[in-house]
Amino acid sequence: MIVTAVLTAVVVWLLFYGTVATLPLGMICAAAGAGLAALGRHSHDGVLSIDIIAQRSRLCSVNPALKVCGCVGLLIFCVAADSVPVGVGLALAMLLLTVAAGGLPLHDYLALLALPAAFMLVSGLALLFSWEKSPVGVINLPLAGGWLSVTAAAQVRTLLVMAKALGAVSCLYLLSLSTPMTDIINVLRRARVPAVVVELMYLIYRYIFILLNMHRTMRDAAESRLGYDSYRQSLRTTGQIYGNLLALSFRKAGACFDAMESRCYDGEIRFLEQAKPLRPLHILTAAGLALLAAGLLFAGGRM
Amino acid sequence: MREILRLEGLSYAYEEDRTALADLSVTLYGGQKVAVLGNNGAGKSTFFLCCNGVLSPASGEIVLEGKKLERKGPDRSLLRRSVGLVFQDPDSQIIAGTVEAEISFGPMNLRLQDEDVRRRVDQAIANMQLEDFRSRAPHYLSGGEKKRVSIADVLAMEPQLLLLDEPAASLDPANSRLLEQNLELLSRRGLGLVIATHDVDFAWRWAERILVFHRGRLQADADPESVFADEELLTRCGLEQPILYQVGILQGMKPLPRTVEDMRRREMKAAESV
């Protein structure tokens, strides 16, 4: 989280250097970095926590088809619109929805956003700098007989790319932080995705947790017998654990198949779906978001 | 009592020379509480898988409510819906992402109407006190809760006979007590219960009939008193007498006490009469 905060401060400074006066810019950068560092909290078990957050979200009861269509639609719009206001506006709207309406604490949201944000910021750095023969940029550092420069054009381009990426990631986050995997799979089934794909998704989702659990137990058992004492030893242990995991999964798959057979499994997996009806408020919110995105594009124009 | 399932001369072998069940004949009734005892590898699990139709026996006959069943086709599905099987490890049974969806898997396979499925799921959830977990993901539940889900899974198929493979293994005392209470309720409703267990104290306390398996053969099929009185049988099959049985013998009690409460009640009565 600290790394992301520092990166953010640096990238913001480079993005606006030359367009905003130095003193206010310095203050904005320091505030952005410090705010992120203070509000964001680091969490290690990313994948699992997203799944739990989705189940606890207050937006979990919203019709999943609406969420999937809305989020994917806005994501495509955000990428296609090529507009900084649309990207930033959507990112803010999604943050507001997930935090205020979904009930996710702000620092958890920022901590989850830190991972993709770190990637975006590093690529932002790469986009900002270019090697020039003469000092043409707003910032120029002498390097190898030329100049490492940040040009005004690069600033504009980077800002656009990062705004689009942030908006798109935020759209996906609203979906994944409010919709459990089973709901998403159900939507895919309704959208006539082939049955074999949907059934595989159900089983993979369930078995990820079983395999993770088995792996954790085996790793702890190996650890307790000093299996990771030296580098050589830990390589050997890891290999054995993966081999064992394969054998165990085969056995587990056999037992699972027997259990399914005993409940009259006939080659097709079907579950009862929880009814999550469309509500006027939710449709209005989705329409409002679409209008907001269109309005931002109209007012801000393309850049 | 109403006969539900009758096995006649049933045999099964996983490999040619390794017999798991040999010449098994047994009849199971509705509303009866049966414990199945026997050490590891005695054939208890194979017996269950044959009763439920997951395994097809090499020879012998299966008779369901007086009707002889064919090995394949609709008869096998009939057997699976009439005889429910709860596996020892809930994780090998649970496949769905939410408790409600999981319990609906069986009834959905019976091709029932949606309202009917919903009614059965609701009833199974109520029976196993899972109301609070309805839309939770099974992988975030505790062992005891998962066990209840795996029983509700099978109850939703409305079987007449319920087979449970070591249901109390890896449950804490509070959860085992809850399980026993739930089983008692089901039994009162006329469901036949067959439980494979290693816990002789539980078998003594709970069962009205005991089947003892050893090396794939049925060694005894009798009431608990006669089974635990047969010391030769117990030694041969690696079993022990229940604590309360031994205490009752030592105290010269007749009939022998089945539970601690039963014993306490009788001692109080004896103290009053003095």
Image: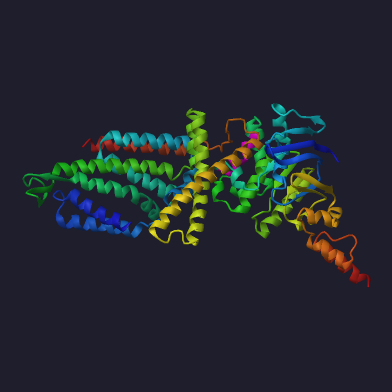
Which residue sits at x=23%, y=46%? A124
Which residue sits at x=81%, y=33%? B65
Q: Nearer the viewer, residue A275 or B2?
A: B2
The answer, for residue A266, to whether it is visible in the render is yes
Provide residue B188's location: percent of width, then percent of height.
79, 47
Which residue sits at x=19%, y=54%? A25
Q: Nearer the viewer, residue A219 or A29?
A: A219
Q: Residue furthest right?
A: B274
- Looking at the rendering, the stretch of residues picked out in magenta corresponds to B98-107
Provide residue B172's location: percent of width, then percent of height.
65, 58
The quadrant holding residue B30 is top right
Q: How many numbered discs sit on the rendered protein?
A: 0
Colouring convention used in this rendered image of the protein: rainbow
Magenta stretch encompasses residue B242: no
Q: Nearer the viewer, residue A233 or B152?
A: A233
The quadrant holding residue B26 is top right
- The quadrant of the image that shows the N terminus of chain B is top right
| B245 lies above or below B184 | below
